[in-house]
Amino acid sequence: MKFPGLVLLLGVLWLALASPATAEPVATRYGLGLSGAIAYDPGGARDFLQLTGFALFDYETVWRHPAPEPLRFKVEGNAGVTTGPHRTMVSVNVLAHYRLVGWANQTLLPYAEAGIGVVYSDYRVKGQGLRFNFNPQAGIGLQGRSGVWRDWFVALRLHHVSNGDLHDANRGINSALLQVGRLFDW
């Protein structure tokens, strides 16, 4: 069984066996951000800029099983362009977002997040094979809690693009991504 089929099977089994959540749900938050990324592998890969919109859900509400209170489920969409010769790219990602409340103070709330998505770009690096790829990523960030920085955030992520061996040519692209944005209540 190929990797995507195994992931789908495990996801369906997990959802079918999950028990309903019992805690009071946390309000959904929404956000907008601007990201800039520097591709560091392979050499000559294109850097990019993206506009990001996302929703940050209570984890227990989405996955219907008990979870630590600081855990959230993030769904984000991105649209952007590469630097140099401008080429477009769009992606959709899901991430586990964990607020590091033990390290928080009155001004800043640190968090970590990791997840995967799919990305389409109208360019490829040599040996990449496909324009449609998977997009695993992980990062850390800080969210403002008070004053002028309330609900603003900054994050740093490691960002990978590859086709997961769906094609014989599977040269990945690795980037470091800086994201700045704001959370909103709706």
Image: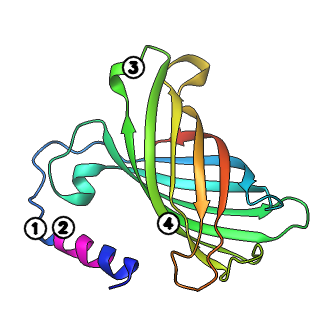
Crowdedness of circle 1 by 10 Å Cα count: few (<14), some, many (20+)? few
User: In the rendered view, would you say 63 is above or below 157?
Assistant: below
Mark 1 to mark 2 CA distance (whole Å): 5 Å
Q: Is the C-beta separation of discs 1 and 2 under 8 Å?
A: yes
Q: Is the C-beta separation of discs 2 and 4 under 8 Å?
A: no
Residue found at the far right of this picture: 85
Q: Which residue is mark 2?
A: 14
Mark 3 to mark 2 CA distance (whole Å): 31 Å
The overriding secondary structure of the stretch rendered in magenta is: helix
Which percent across, then down, holds residue 117?
50, 66
Residue at the location (28% across, 42% down)? 26
Mark 3 and mark 1 lie on one chain; the one further toward the N terminus is: 1
Q: Amino acid at mark 2?
A: Trp
Residue at the location (64% across, 67% down)? 172
Boundaries of the magenta span: 8-15
Q: Is the C-beta separation of discs 4 and 1 under 8 Å?
A: no
Q: Is the C-beta separation of discs 3 and 1 under 8 Å?
A: no
Which percent across, then down, holds residue 64?
17, 58
Residue 103's disc is 3
Mark 3 to mark 4 CA distance (whole Å): 28 Å
Mark 4 to mark 1 CA distance (whole Å): 24 Å
Q: Which residue is mark 1?
A: 17
